[in-house]
């Protein structure tokens, strides 16, 4: 049955293909509610059951439905995880291949990279285009027309055969006319490449126009409101230079489009590369540059280990929630400039133009920076129980409790000084079923300590955890933040395919409160 592969401690035998199976008379528990054992709720969907008996196979289907999410919400959650992972990977590609000043621009990194590649070869391309405008390849094509016999005519064996077969046409002669034929396979491929490059430059120019317009109207997030005017002016000038260069390149390519022969070439793509395309050095160079540009497109693939998380509804919800937090902090609201950790450091997970997106290791840390404000977002990381294992920059907290493994921990620093943390847990269950985790949540709020909080000497009396947020799915989509009395704990609805206003406002308010609390302690965030 689908899903046997990730049951823990099930003791199932394995067949010759390495697939676990249930032997005759054997039993296995797929799911137990309120069990201390590691059983999981199957992700909703259709599961295939295959029965082998007496040399025959019988099949049946089991449908699992969710009681926490609708089918649309579940589908949205899965799609958003995939889209956000690829979006983050695209951000990596942008940082690797695009000038750092342009990384917040709404320009597709593939488009920017292809423009730069075409630009690097364009001196050769321009010379070839100028030559082709004067000396494009052609052949002479024979055509035959009937014309009056008294007019001068060129005849060959075809004309003679026609005259013999049609003696009734005594007043006409089938005359040979030779016409220049430009509609050759190599010219069709040349036209296809030129049209593709002009389209690429059109898209690039349009993207630059959008960026320039947004920057001039102060509606682009590439710069915050406190960016110096001279820096903005210099950046706009550089964007203008890119646009001028792209327009110049487009004009050079359009020289071919003004040639009379260009419009005689059919808009049909050759099924294979014509031999003449490789024999003529001019055509071969155009073809080679086109191949290089085509190879610039990056493909993404999820690491096979994602299959495990994909089959567990609770783990899929945790991953989705983590990506919601990460995407929120990486958005334009906070204007962070520098990112590191996990997917932002892709060394070892790309091969050529295939980027394999890794799973999220336990304890992974993503660091975000904006001026003096730094956030460390730790995923599924254990909080040390020994103060000796803390560090003012990377591990600023420890705990006196055994409850030491929140799903997400956000450590906040101003000017390198630790000002507090937000702990987050993602619970794939009803809000009314969260009471059995209350001891764990209270422990997070009360038992976490930091010898570095505000750089105070008497740090023991300060609780570094400003808030414990518990996210849960609300099938109906409604719900408000619910603070628990006398405790720094809040229950927050976080559901796919619904308005995330409560989630966004809660985090925004918390960060602002932490910055204000730091000001009260003499630590001021400088703009």
Image (cartoon, helix red, strand yellow):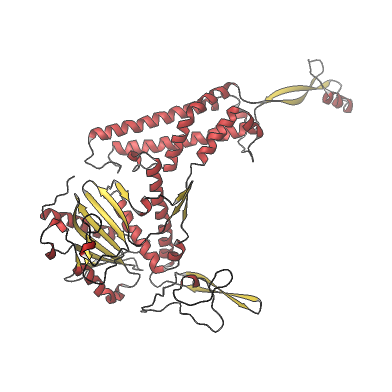
Residue 262 in view in this figure: no
**Could you tell me which residue is drawn at 28 percent across and 38 percent down?**
217
* Residue 402 in the image: above or below residue 503: below
**Could you tell me which residue is drawn at 44 percent across and 39 percent down?**
113
- Foreground of the two, 385 or 416: 385
* Residue 403 in the image: above or below residue 455: below
Q: Is residue 149 left or right of residue 415?
A: right
Which residue is situated farthest in the bottom direction here? 25
- Foreground of the two, 54 or 475: 54
Which residue is situated farthest in the front direction here? 388
Count of marks overlaid on the render: 0
* Image quadrant containing the C terminus: top left
- Foreground of the two, 37 or 223: 37
* Residue 479 in the image: above or below residue 155: below
Q: Quadrant of residue 99?
A: top left
Q: Residue 329 at what x, y percent from top left?
A: 29, 53
Q: Residue 364 at what x, y percent from top left?
A: 33, 58
Q: Quadrant of residue 154?
A: top right
**Could you tell me which residue is drawn at 23 percent across and 34 percent down?**
229
Residue 252 in view in this figure: yes
Q: Residue 339 at what x, y percent from top left?
A: 31, 49
Q: Residue 292 at what x, y percent from top left?
A: 52, 38
């Amino acid at each position: 049955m689908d899903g046997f592969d990730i049951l823990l401690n099930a003791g199932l035998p394995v067949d010759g293909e390495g697939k676990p199976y249930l032997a005759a008379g054997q039993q296995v528990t797929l799911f137990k509610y309120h069990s201390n054992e590691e059983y999981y709720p199957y992700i909703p969907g259709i599961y295939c059951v295959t029965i082998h008996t007496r040399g025959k196979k019988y099949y049946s289907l089991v449908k699992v439905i969710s009681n926490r999410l609708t089918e649309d919400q579940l589908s949205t959650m899965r799609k958003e995880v995939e889209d956000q992972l690829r979006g983050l990977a695209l951000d990596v590609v942008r940082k690797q291949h695009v000038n750092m000043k342009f990384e917040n621009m709404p320009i597709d990194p593939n488009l920017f990279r292809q423009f730069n590649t075409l630009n690097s070869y364009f001196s050769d391309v321009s010379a070839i285009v100028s030559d082709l405008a004067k000396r494009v390849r052609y052949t002479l094509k024979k055509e035959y027309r009937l014309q009056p016999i008294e007019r001068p005519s060129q005849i060959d064996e075809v004309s003679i055969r026609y005259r013999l077969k049609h003696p009734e046409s005594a007043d006409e002669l089938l005359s040979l006319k030779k016409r220049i034929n430009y509609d050759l396979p190599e010219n069709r491929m040349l036209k296809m490449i030129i049209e593709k490059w002009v389209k690429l430059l059109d898209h690039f120019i349009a993207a630059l126009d959008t960026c320039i317009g947004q920057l001039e109207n102060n509606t682009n997030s590439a710069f915050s409101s406190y960016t110096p005017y001279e820096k903005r002016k210099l950046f706009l000038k550089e964007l203008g230079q890119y646009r001028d260069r792209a327009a110049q390149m487009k004009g050079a390519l359009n020289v071919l489009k003004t040639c009379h022969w260009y419009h005689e070439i059919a808009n049909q793509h050759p099924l294979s590369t014509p031999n003449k395309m490789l024999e003529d050095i001019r055509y071969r160079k155009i073809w080679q540059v086109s191949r290089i540009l085509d190879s610039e497109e990056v493909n993404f693939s999820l690491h096979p280990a994602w299959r495990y998380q994909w089959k567990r509804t609770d783990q899929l919800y945790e991953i989705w929630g983590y990506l919601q937090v990460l995407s929120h902090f990486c958005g334009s609201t906070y204007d962070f400039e520098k990112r590191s950790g996990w997917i932002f450091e892709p060394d070892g997970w790309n091969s050529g133009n295939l980027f394999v997106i890794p799973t999220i290791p336990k304890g992974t840390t993503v660091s975000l920076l904006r001026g003096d404000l730094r956030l460390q977002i730790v995923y599924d990381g254990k909080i040390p129980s020994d103060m000796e294992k803390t560090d003012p920059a990377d591990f600023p907290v420890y705990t006196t409790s055994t409850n030491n493994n929140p799903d997400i921990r956000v450590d906040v620093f101003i000017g390198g000084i630790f000002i507090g943390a937000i702990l987050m847990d993602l619970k794939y269950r009803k809000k009314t079923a969260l009471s059995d985790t209350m001891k764990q949540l209270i422990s997070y709020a009360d038992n976490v300590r930091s010898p570095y909080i505000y750089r105070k000497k008497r740090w023991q009396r300060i609780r570094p955890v400003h808030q414990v947020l518990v996210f849960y799915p609300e099938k109906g989509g409604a719900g408000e933040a619910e603070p628990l009395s006398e405790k720094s704990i809040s229950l927050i609805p976080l559901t796919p395919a619904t308005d995330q206003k409560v989630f966004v406002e809660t985090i925004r308010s918390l960060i602002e409160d932490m910055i204000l609390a730091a000001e009260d302690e003499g630590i001021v965030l400088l703009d």
